[in-house]
Amino acid sequence: MPHPPMPLRLDTARLTLRPWTEPDIAAHRALVAERGGGTPSVEDNRRMIEAQRAASERTGIALLPVVRRGTDDFIGYCGLTVGRASLDEPEIAYELFRRVHGQGYATEAASAVLDAAAGTGRKRLWSTVRPWNTPSFRVLDKLGFRRDHVTTDDAGELVWLTRSLP
């Protein structure tokens, strides 16, 4: 591994990002269902989370559940993933329940992940966003990401943004 692993627990003023637990499965299924296209089965969701854990052990980066401090209320996930990028320059990714949009949670969680990524010695991160996802563009703008290029895949246009790390 060219970089040390990122911490698997990050605390902010209002949030904790931590490893996946069994109770996260039901909440994550509801989050996936919010996208449209149905709710994954418990087993499919468990496999997704197990794949995340295995990828994290292999790569030293992770997508972590985001919970509100004091309540342990699962509101989404945030972290680093190879995704469409690379292990050296991974993607930052986040997805939160609509009920908590507009409260600064995505920016707060992603800011902690940026700091964790910088702590691994990485020099640059990517993010890919669909053109309709205005809230994600706002979060990424606050974090200092800038548009780099646009590609197209089976689902349509994909905007690539990037940010250098200190």
Image (spheres, grey):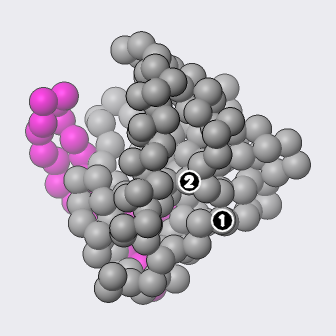
Contact check, label 1 and label 2, Cβ < 8 Å: yes
- Magenta-colored span: 139-166
The reply to whether residue 17 is visible in this rendering is yes
Say left or right for 154 vs 55.
Answer: left
Residue 125, quarter of the rendered image = bottom left
The kind of residue on which mark 1 rests is: Arg
| Residue 157 in the figure: left or right of residue 46 | left
Q: Which of 55 and 28 is in front in this view?
A: 55
Figure check: 63 above or below 134:
below
Residue ID at (58%, 33%): 25
Q: State the image coordinates of residue 94 (x, y, percent, origin top left).
A: 49, 47
Residue located at (32% from left, 43% from top) = 129
Q: Specify the quadrant that holds the C terminus.
A: bottom left
Which residue reaches farthest front?
43
Residue beneath label 1, please? Answer: 9
Tell me where residue 33 appears, x and y as whole percent: 48, 19
